[in-house]
Image (cartoon, rainbow, N blue to C red):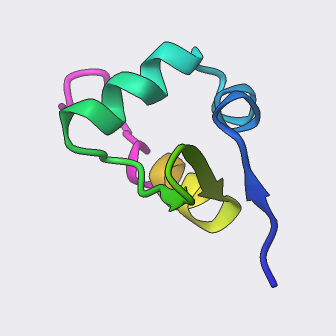
Amino acid sequence: MQQLYTTTQAAQFLGVSKAFLERDRWAGARIPFLKVGTRAVRYSMEDLESFLNQQRRISTSQS
């Protein structure tokens, strides 16, 4: 079973603020998340690492 991370833990791993992840969820979730129960939001390490890999660029001119 994979370990799940809170918004705070995921933000620390990615080096972003909790607000960044909250806005991402509100705007359409580029980073997949799990809803546990009615309120708890969790992230898998696999999804966090996948998001980071998608952000790789070889030039600052790439969008």
The residue lying toward the viewer, choosing from 38 and 46, is 38
Residue plotted at (34% across, 38% down): 25
Give percent across and percent down for residue 20: 44, 20
Q: Mostly what secondary structure, the magenta segment?
A: loop
Give percent across and percent down for residue 29: 30, 45
Q: In this view, does 42 lie to the left or right of 31?
A: right
Q: Is residue 16 something one can see in this rendering? A: yes
Quarter placement of the C terminus:
top left
Residue plotted at (60% across, 46% down): 40
- The answer to whether residue 46 is magenta is no
Give percent across and percent down for residue 2: 78, 76
Give percent across and percent down for residue 59: 32, 30
Determine the residue located farthest toward the bottom in the rendered image: 1
Residue plotted at (26% across, 32% down): 26
The residue lying toward the viewer, choosing from 50 and 18, is 18
Q: What is the magenta range?
A: 54-63
Residue plotted at (63% across, 34% down): 7
- The answer to whether residue 60 is magenta is yes
